Amino acid sequence: MSRVYNFGAGPSTIPLEALEEAQRELVDYKGEGMSIMEASHRSKMYDDVHQEALSLVRELYKVPEDYDILFLQGGASTQFAMVPMNLSLGGKVEYADTGSWSSKAIKEAKILGLDTEIVASSKETSYDRIPSEISFSDDADYAYITSNNTIYGTQYKEYPSTNAPLVVDASSDIFSYPIDWNKVDLLFAGAQKNAGPSGVTIVIVKKELQDRVKENVPSMLRYKTHAEKDSLYNTPPTFGIYMLGLVLKWLKKQGGVEGIQKLNEAKAALLYDAIDNSDGFYVGHAQKDSRSLMNVSFNIKDKDADLESKLVALATENGMIGLKGHRSIGGLRASIYNAMSMEGVQALVDLMNKFAEENR
Ligand code: PMP
């Protein structure tokens, strides 16, 4: 078997151990004579899987009891609308604009006709940083941030403090460091980067906030509908939730969120050092104090598109894929999520060093 090192931004690499367990169980789940994906979502066979995934999220992420954990569909993008539909009280809502995904969230609040304020933005400097001063109003209906900016490769080192409920889009850094739940009221993420395959959206939301929802919000778009039924109001994405459970079991063996955080720091340091020590051959997109531990976006000097394509092609030949930068900023991007090994990052760094020597 030959597996590539997948540096794609999502869907992205999944721990091999989780894939192999799914493979072993695929056609006959624990002697049941069928696959978990063929099982009714009302069966005991599936319910055990569902409850285990829920309790692993609570355990590993240390989610307090006054928060519900929901498994929804529609991707993180549906949350851009569900958040305002459920949390707005008719007053102003506030956003920090740190990249394309924040902008898309802002767009949905505006579509819903809300008084939407952008309190800080790094758009002027092509989103190369998390703005240093972000001050949300205490009387905002909610304050909204994108904890990790997948395209630009920036990440909050600390979440802003506010008395307004804080909403965090953690799609590209969920389960990669511990959360201070005193600061966060709602956190959501598509699973397809750090938590498994696409198709499941994890929402962790404080119970007391769920009563704000207005009468004209349809059932499927209310957090409360799903919370009251343990995310079994309708058919959930059963296979994705099963895979999420396998990924979380793997994460537990890595020392949980705290253990993987250390590995993530070491991986990112290795890659950023290679950029910083390249005598200007590689240029990181993010300002140093805003650098993401998950997505490393960079260019080759003078944004040399030919050299950048050459490096992407060479990497592919050497079993390293997904390095082309997002179409909106070009260049290169290495996504080094939880499941990317140190060996993978080392292989990339070795290739980058050699490439720089040969092409400077
Ligand atoms: N937020 C962030 C930070 C993302 O990176 C992405 C996807 N790359 C999304 C939201 C949108 O996720 P989805 O495709 O699941 O709607």
Image (cartoon, grey):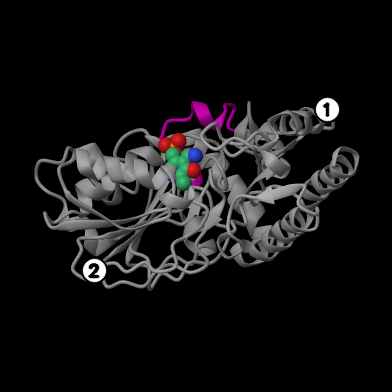
Picture residue at 33% right of the left edge, 38% below the top: 78
> What range is drawn magenta here?
32-49
Q: Is residue 324 in the magenta section? A: no
* Residue 239: numbered disc: none
- The answer to whether 26 is drawn above or below residue 229 in the figure is above
- The answer to whether 197 is drawn above or below residue 274 in the figure is above
* Residue 317: numbered disc: 1
Q: Is residue 40 in the magenta section? A: yes
**For residue 233, side relative to residue 160 (left or right):** left
Label 2 lies in ligand 1 vicinity (Cβ under 8 Å): no
Q: Quadrant of residue 348?
A: top right
User: What element does badge 1 sit on?
Assistant: helix
Contact check, label 1 and label 2, Cβ < 8 Å? no
Q: Could you say where residue 292 lies in the image, as x and y percent from the top left?
A: 59, 56
Picture residue at 75% right of the left edge, 58% below the top: 276
Quarter for ligand 1? top left
User: What element does badge 2 sit on?
Assistant: loop
- The answer to whether 159 is drawn above or below residue 89 in the figure is below
Observer able to see residue 276: yes
Q: Decide which of 237, 138 is in the foreground and name it.
A: 138
Residues packed near mark 2 inside 10 Å, few (<14), some (14 to 19) or many (20 plus): some
* Residue 137: numbered disc: 2
**For residue 72, side relative to residue 358 (left or right):** left
- The answer to whether 193 is drawn above or below residue 291 in the figure is above
